[in-house]
Amino acid sequence: MSYQNFFDANREGWNKRTEVHKTSAFYNVEGWKKGDEALTAVELREVGDVSGKSLLHLQCHFGQDTLSWARKGATVTGADLSDSAVQYARELAAEMNLPAEFVCCNVYDLRDHLQGQFDIVFTSYGTIGWLPDLKPWAEVVAHFLKPGGFFYIADFHPVLWMMDDDMTHLKYPYHNKEVIVTEQQGTYADRESALEYKEYGWNHSLGEIINSLINVGLRIEFLNEYDFSPYNCFAKTVKGEDGNYRIQGLEGILPMMYSIKAVK
Ligand SMILES: C[S@@+](CC[C@H](N)C(=O)[O-])C[C@H]1O[C@@H](n2cnc3c(N)ncnc32)[C@H](O)[C@@H]1O
């Protein structure tokens, strides 16, 4: 199968997921419309003040986080592979009267669909796992950054992606060996939903991620690792007193997310 077939299948999966996500308790769109925060404490603290800044959100899904940055004063652009997600993002922006541009395309093709450079390129929670090769991804990141601007990623930790879906044992390689094909039932935002689709993903080690950014000339300002997920989107989670989620029996043992800030 060519990468294009993988991307087409993934787009179909994300279109299906989007329909469920719109009304899921997980995304809490109605609460968000009334002012609930969608961004987590991690990126709010680490990205800092965005007012007056231009921000490009890669793999923005249906734009809830993109529009959350707009609420904080950024001039935002979101890009995503899923046409259903982008359509809903545009609807949400119009309904909430928030200025935003949304582009529908593969992140690898973004240079063919979007002009300009940005103060911040942002991406978070469920991103590069759908990308086979980080070299051209990092080139896109660097291309869209203004000199002096920064890239920020917060995502689930590559060690977490080694675990099987039930979080009982190590199943997948840490390094990017080959495509990982999974038969999905439901979605992380609603495990009981009747969705079924095949998904194609790739694991990326921290070394691969960091080196891809260094190799396009970015300077790493920090790499932080956390033993929690701010989202309850995995099996066997327990909620800690800090409001974050960990895997039962692996609390304090398993790294669950990381964040990187890199400056151009
Ligand atoms: C889990 S969401 C990430 C956004 C955010 N964490 C959220 O939940 O709203 C992953 C997004 O990546 C998008 N995506 C997957 N592969 C992509 C690709 N090759 N190019 C652009 N977007 C892609 C999907 O369509 C989906 O909307």
Image: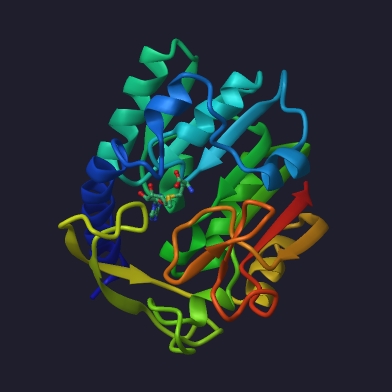
At a point 50% along the width and 61% down the height, the residue shown is: 128
User: Where residue 252 sits in the image (x, y, percent)?
Assistant: 70, 75
Image quarter of residue 27: top left
View extreme (top): residue = 97
At a point 34% along the width and 46% down the height, the residue shown is: 81
User: Where residue 109 sits in the image (x, y, percent)?
Assistant: 42, 48
Up-down: is 7 above or below 113?
below
View extreme (front): residue = 241
Up-down: is 132 above or below 117?
below
Residue closer to the observer: 256 or 77: 256
At a point 25% along the width and 44% down the height, the residue shown is: 20
Up-down: is 7 above or below 256?
above
| Quadrant where the image shows the N terminus | bottom left
Is residue 77 toward the left or the right of residue 224 in the image?
Answer: left
User: Where residue 221 sits in the image (x, y, percent)?
Assistant: 84, 54
Residue closer to the observer: 183 or 29: 29
